[in-house]
C-alpha cells in the first residue's frame, strides 16, 4: 500500500433519495476508515497487524434484489511500471476490492504476505476475495487477507467453490501429474496421475467436477474419464467415435462434454449421450475448447491453429456458429445476462464486446486482463479495463466509464445483492 494519503472519494451535492441515504452513510463511514496510513476503527494500523484493511460493512447485505458492482484491482506505488513488474513479489502493492467505486477491502500483496498479484490466483465470491499462494512446499488459502487453511504440497488452484462457510478447491499438483479435491483444506479425493477439468460446480445441490487418468497400454497411452458428484466417482464412457474429451460441465442434472471425432479433431458436444457436431468447424482442427451453460443452451469456445496465422477463436451457441473471430483477436472473458453469453475480446484494433450479434467497442488504449473481468450487473454489461500504457484503469458500464484511483490493473468484476 502506498505511504501517502489515499483519496478514492469524490463528493458532489446531489438530492438524495431514500435508497441513496444508506449508500451515502456508507461512503461517509468508509471515508472515516480510509485515509493517511489506513487504520482500523480502534486506531491500530493494519500493517501492524496482518496488513489487510476491511470495511466493517463487508458481507452485510440488506437482502434486497438489487446488485452492487464489485471490482478487484491491483494497486502499485505511483510511478511503478506494473506492465514489466521488475520487482514482482517484493514490490509493495495491494489487492483492492471496490464496492460501486468505493474501496471495501485492501490486502497487501507480496511473498511476505503470501498473496499473489496473478489474476488467476484470486477470486470474488459473495463480496469476499479469496486468494491462493504457493510457498516452496505449501499451498495457502486466504479470505479477505485472513488465513483460512494451508496444507503441504504445491497446487495450482484450477477452480474454487464456496457453499456457505464451506470452501471447495480443485488443485492440480504443480510440476507433477495428479490433482487434489479438497473441502476446507482436507482431502476428499486425489489422484497421483491425472488431470481435472477446470469446472468445479454446484449442480442439483451436488458439488461436481470431472477428470481423466492416463492408461498405459501396449499400443500406447489412452485416457479414462470420470465424473465426481459429492465425492462419488463414476466412469464417463465417451461415444465410440469420440477419441478425446476436452471439457466437461454439469447442468440441470445432465452431463455435457466437448470431444473430438475420429482423427479429424472435429469438435462435437455430447449431452446425455446425444452428439451434436459444431456447424462450420469441420475445416478446422480443434486445439482446445471450453463449455459454458446459459439458460439451457450450451455455449462452446474453441481454439484452432491456422496455418500461417496465430490461433483462431470460435464461439458457438448449441451447434450454431456465432462467430469465427479474425486473426489477432482473442476471447478474454465471457459472461451471461441470463439468456445470452456476452463475449469480451482483445484485438489488434482494440477491445470490444460481442452481444446479440453487435460489436460494442470500448475506449481506446484499454484492454482486459484475466478471464473474470466482466459481469452483468442489474442487466448492465460491466467490464474492468486496464490501460495499455500504464494509465489508471476504468470500469465501463453500458457506455459510461468510471476511473479507479489506482496505479495498476483490474483483474475481476462481479456482483452481489445488497
Image (cartoon, grey):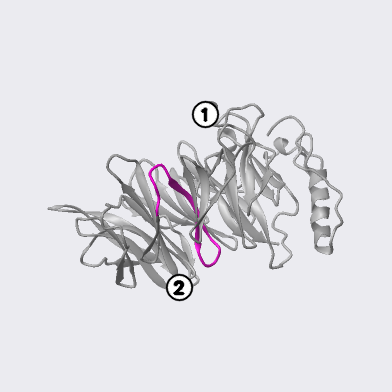
Q: Image quadrant of residue 255?
A: bottom left
Circle 1 is placed at which residue position? 84
Q: Give whichever of 8, 56 is nearer the camera.
A: 8
Front-most of residues 412 and 228: 412
Residue closer to the observer: 398 or 63:
398
Left or right, 174 with respect to 335, comes to left
Let me know if residue 32 is in the magenta part: no
User: Which callout, 1 or 2, points at the residue further toward the start of the chain?
Assistant: 1
Label disc, if present, on residue 138 of the rendered structure: none
Q: Nearer the viewer, mark 1 or mark 2?
A: 1
- Residue extent of the magenta highlight: 324-342
Residue 296: give x, y in percent of width and height. 46, 71
Residue at point 45%, 73% (across, down): 252
Return the residue nearer the eye: 327 or 87: 327
Q: Position of residue 301 (x, y in %)?
A: 40, 56
Figure quadrant of residue 211: bottom left
- What residue is pinned by disc 2? 252
User: Which structural element holds mark 2?
Assistant: loop
Quadrant the C terminus occupies: bottom right
Q: What is the CA distance from the residue labelled 1 to the residue labelled 2?
A: 44 Å
Residue 336 covered by magenta stretch: yes
| Element type at mark 1 | loop
Residue 246 against residue 384 in the figure, above or below: below
Camera sees residue 358: yes
Residue farthest to the left, as pictured = 218
Amino acid at each position: 500500500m502506498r505511504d501517502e494519503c489515499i483519496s478514492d472519494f469524490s463528493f458532489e451535492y446531489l438530492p438524495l433519495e431514500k435508497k441513496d441515504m444508506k449508500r451515502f452513510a456508507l461512503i461517509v463511514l468508509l471515508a472515516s476508515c480510509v485515509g493517511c496510513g489506513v487504520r482500523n476503527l480502534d486506531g491500530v494500523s493494519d500493517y501492524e497487524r496482518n496488513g489487510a484493511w476491511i470495511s466493517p460493512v463487508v458481507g452485510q447485505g440488506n437482502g434486497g434484489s438489487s446488485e452492487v458492482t464489485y471490482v478487484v484491482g491491483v494497486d502499485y506505488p505511483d510511478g511503478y511500471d506494473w506492465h514489466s513488474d521488475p520487482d514482482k513479489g517484493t514490490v509493495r502493492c495491494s489487492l483492492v476490492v471496490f464496492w460501486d467505486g468505493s474501496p471495501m477491502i485492501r490486502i497487501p500483496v507480496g511473498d511476505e504476505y503470501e498473496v499473489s498479484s496473478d489474476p488467476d490466483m484470486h477470486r470474488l465470491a459473495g463480496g469476499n476475495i479469496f486468494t491462493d499462494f504457493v510457498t516452496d512446499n505449501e499451498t495457502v488459502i486466504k479470505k479477505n487477507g485472513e488465513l483460512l487453511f494451508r496444507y503441504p504440497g504445491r497446487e495450482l488452484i484450477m477452480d474454487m467453490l464456496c457453499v456457505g462457510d464451506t470452501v471447495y478447491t480443485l488443485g492440480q499438483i504443480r510440476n507433477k501429474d495428479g490433482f487434489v479435491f479438497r473441502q476446507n483444506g482436507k482431502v476428499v479425493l486425489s489422484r497421483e496421475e491425472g488431470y481435472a477439468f477446470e469446472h468445479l460446480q454446484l449442480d442439483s445441490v451436488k458439488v461436481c467436477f470431472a477428470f481423466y487418468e492416463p492408461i498405459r497400454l501396449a499400443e500406447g497411452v489412452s485416457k479414462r474419464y470420470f465424473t465426481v458428484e459429492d465425492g462419488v466417482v463414476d466412469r464417463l464412457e465417451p461415444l465410440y467415435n469420440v477419441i478425446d474429451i476436452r471439457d466437461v460441465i454439469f447442468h440441470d442434472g445432465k452431463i455435457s462434454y466437448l470431444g473430438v471425432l475420429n482423427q479429424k479433431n472435429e469438435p462435437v458436444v455430447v449431452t446425455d449421450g446425444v452428439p451434436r457436431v459444431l456447424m462450420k468447424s469441420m475445416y478446422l482442427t480443434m486445439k482446445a475448447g471450453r463449455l459454458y451453460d446459459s439458460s439451457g443452451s450450451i455455449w462452446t469456445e474453441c481454439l484452432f491453429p491456422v496455418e500461417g496465422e496465430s490461433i483462431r477463436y470460435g464461439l458457438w451457441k448449441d451447434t450454431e456458429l456465432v462467430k469465427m473471430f479474425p486473426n489477432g483477436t482473442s476471447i478474454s472473458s465471457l459472461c451471461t445476462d441470463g439468456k445470452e453469453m456476452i463475449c469480451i475480446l482483445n484485438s489488434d484494433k482494440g477491445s470490444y464486446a460481442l452481444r446479440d450479434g453487435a460489436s460494442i467497442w470500448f475506449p481506446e488504449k484499454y484492454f482486459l486482463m484475466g478471464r473474470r473481468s466482466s459481469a452483468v450487473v442489474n442487466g448492465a454489461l460491466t467490464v474492468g479495463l486496464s490501460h495499455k500504457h500504464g494509465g489508471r484503469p476504468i470500469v465501463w458500464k453500458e457506455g459510461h466509464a468510471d476511473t479507479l484511483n489506482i496505479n495498476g490493473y483490474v483483474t475481476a468484476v462481479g456482483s452481489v445483492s445488497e
